[in-house]
Amino acid sequence: MTKQFNIAVCGSARVGKSTLVNAICGSEVARTSSSLCSVTDEMKKYVLNRACPSANNTASSTEYSITIWDTPGIESWTKEEVEKHFTKIMLESTPLCMIYCASPGSFARLDHLKWLIETCIKSNIFCAL
């Protein structure tokens, strides 16, 4: 039986979310650009199927599937837009982990990040900043 895990990658626009997805996947699966224009305009998923050898050195292994969700960047930082954006991500991807990406000079409101972290905790979602 294959175990299924979902990871959502989110954050502001143009901070390298798709680049991180490519690094996690080990290949250029997500389109990226060095321009100031956002590339990802809808949620996209990339599936990694793997197997992990058993701990007791038997021939069996555990198969697992990790789905990495690349999400559009947050353009509007109003409370309503941020909550709507992250709620949509959580409902569509049902993540085990939500990775919030930022880069030097990127914009984020701390009260909105606090809401995101609290929502992840309530929903039993690991949140990495």
Image (cartoon, rainbow, N blue to C red):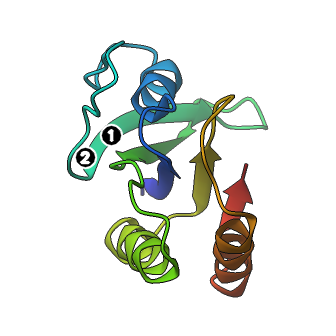
Q: Quadrant of residue 61?
A: top right
Image marks 1 and 2: residues in contact by CB distance under 8 Å = no
> Which disc is residue 18 wearing?
none
What residue lies at 47% left-to-right and 43% top-to-bottom? Answer: 63
Quadrant (top left/top right/bottom left/bottom right) for the N terminus: bottom left
Determine the residue positioned at 72% across, 51% down.
128
- The three-letter amino acid code for the residue at tag 2 is Lys
Q: CA distance from mark 1 to mark 2?
A: 10 Å
Viewer-closest of 58 and 28: 28
Residue sitting at 26 percent across and 39 percent down? 40
- The secondary element bearing badge 2 is classed as strand
Q: Is residue 7 positioned above or below 13 on the image? A: below
Residue indicated by mark 1: 47
Callout 2: 10 Å neighbours few (<14), some, many (20+)?
some
Q: Is residue 127 above or below residue 28?
A: below
Depth check, front residue: 50 or 117? 117
> Dot 1 lies on which element?
strand
Question: Camera-side residue: 84 or 53?
Answer: 84
Q: Residue furthest bottom?
A: 122
Badge 1 amino acid: Val
Q: Nearer the viewer, residue 18 or 67?
A: 18
Where residue 20 appears, as percent x and y from the top left, is 51, 27
The residue under label 2 is 44
Q: Position of residue 115 (x, y in %)?
A: 68, 78
Q: Position of residue 129 (x, y in %)?
A: 73, 49
Query: Which of the 4 image quadrants contains residue 34?
Result: top left
Residue shown at 51%/19% (left/top)?
23
Q: How far across and how far down the image is residue 15, in percent?
A: 51, 32
